Amino acid sequence: MDKKPLFKNTDSLSELGEFGLIDRIAHLFGRSGNADEIGIGDDCAVLPGGDDRSLLITTDMLIEDRHFRRDWISADDLGYKSLAVNMSDISAMGGKPLYAFLSIGLPDDLPLDWIEQFFRGTHALANIHGVKIMGGDTTKSPGPMVINYTLLGEIKSENILRRSAAEPGDQIAVLGNLGESGAGLKLLLEKEPPFSSDEQKLIKAHNRPHLFVDEAQFLAEFGGVHAMIDLSDGLQSDGGHIAKASNASLVVESENITITKPLQNVCQKHSWSHLELALASGEDYGLLFTISREKAEALKHNFKAKFGYSYNIIGEVEPGSAELKLLNKGKLFDIGKMGFDHFRADNQTKK
Ligand code: ADP
Ligand code: MG
């Protein structure tokens, strides 16, 4: 085994950052990645599922006062969201969610009515998509509430959509309303109720994110989609993950990014930059994917015919640089380093 210290030349966790830490963990344990097994580094782990199928596994944890505050989100919405964020990762691979396990640490003064509403929220979402809760673990927490879902899904192996498969010439596309969730969080953090109906829509986008479960499976089955990731940390950060894994450059034209009316209105009201929110704020749980030029027209046509709306094409994959580049009317735009990282100093107080 490699005995070299893991954290040489790094002073602190905040300097290392969430993704730096994951890199070190992957270095120690190995980043398995043969044809039918994917370990650390994509939205889900992939294991052989028998015949031509693969098993997808993902796990995501929500911690009270870090990811949510009980006075900002209803128990029902939290029950929905804690399963939804995992379903989003199964969708990011193009898969079908199937079985879930729920581990919870609960403070013992939690009202029973709150707990019931939490489970009703989860149950409603699980029912819509035929997900079964198969087990979990329950403990008392001496501090904040901790909620951890592990979700299993499946996919035909040849349809798996990895972060690493983007190719120069691909179109870059987005499903979902970029920046809405981040604006909803910003409202909760910085403003007091009452909230306008536009503001309430953004808060809802944050508390009860829209999922693309059927769309993701369609994209994987139709063919022509190369790489995909879900948007949990923001377009710049998540686009950067595809760019890095694919060793290509994701060139996005800011003028092409659709900004919804509620987001435009609320940004205007509070003098916020909608572009910054669309690029740098997380938890939209939309999908970012790249499409081969040859299949682009057919996919666009068939997607529209099936779902009655279109995805948003925002740019093109180019060779080199392994990062996301933003253009404004064709000119390079310096966006610095944005996106959510759990240990970065400026991301410490999400409450
Ligand atoms: P996502 O945002 O899609 O949930 P993350 O950024 O949380 O993905 O994780 C990226 C990759 O790192 C995933 O493959 C995940 O399984 C892996 N990972 C995250 N935390 C750990 C950890 N503590 N130990 C091992 N692997 C981890
Ligand atoms: Mg993800």
Image: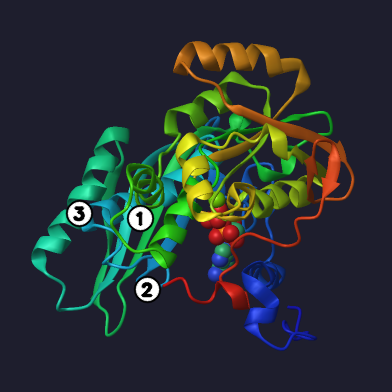
Q: Position of residue 135 (x, y in %)?
A: 27, 56
**Comes first in the chain, label 1 or label 3:** 1
On the image, which quarter does residue 250 sit in? top right
Q: Mark 2 falls on what kind of element?
A: loop
Earlier-in-chain disc, 3 versus 2? 2
Of the pair 115 and 153, the residue shown nearer to us: 115
Dot placed on the residue nearer the N-terminal end, 1 or 2:
2
Q: Position of residue 318 (x, y in %)?
A: 85, 37
Residue 187: quadrant of the picture: bottom left
Coloration of the structure image: rainbow
The type of residue carrying mark 1 is Ser
Point out the image quarter for the N terminus: bottom right
Q: Nearer the viewer, mark 1 or mark 2?
A: 2
Question: Which residue is at the front of the view, 283 or 293?
Answer: 283
Task: Give the residue at mark 3.
Answer: 119
Q: CA distance from mark 3 to mark 2?
A: 20 Å
The answer to whether mark 3 is within 8 Å of ligand 1 is no
Q: Is mark 2 within 8 Å of ligand 1?
A: no
Give the label, 3 or 2, closer to the camera. 2
Q: Residue furthest bottom?
A: 11
Q: Secondary structure at mark 1?
A: helix
Q: Give amino acid for label 2.
A: Asp
Q: Is residue 10 above or below residue 104?
A: below
Residue occupied by mark 1: 82
Q: Is residue 309 left or right of residue 235?
A: left
Per the rendering, the mark at residue 65 is 2
Query: How busy is the neighbourhood of tag 3: few (under 14 within 10 Å), some, or many (20 plus)?
Result: some
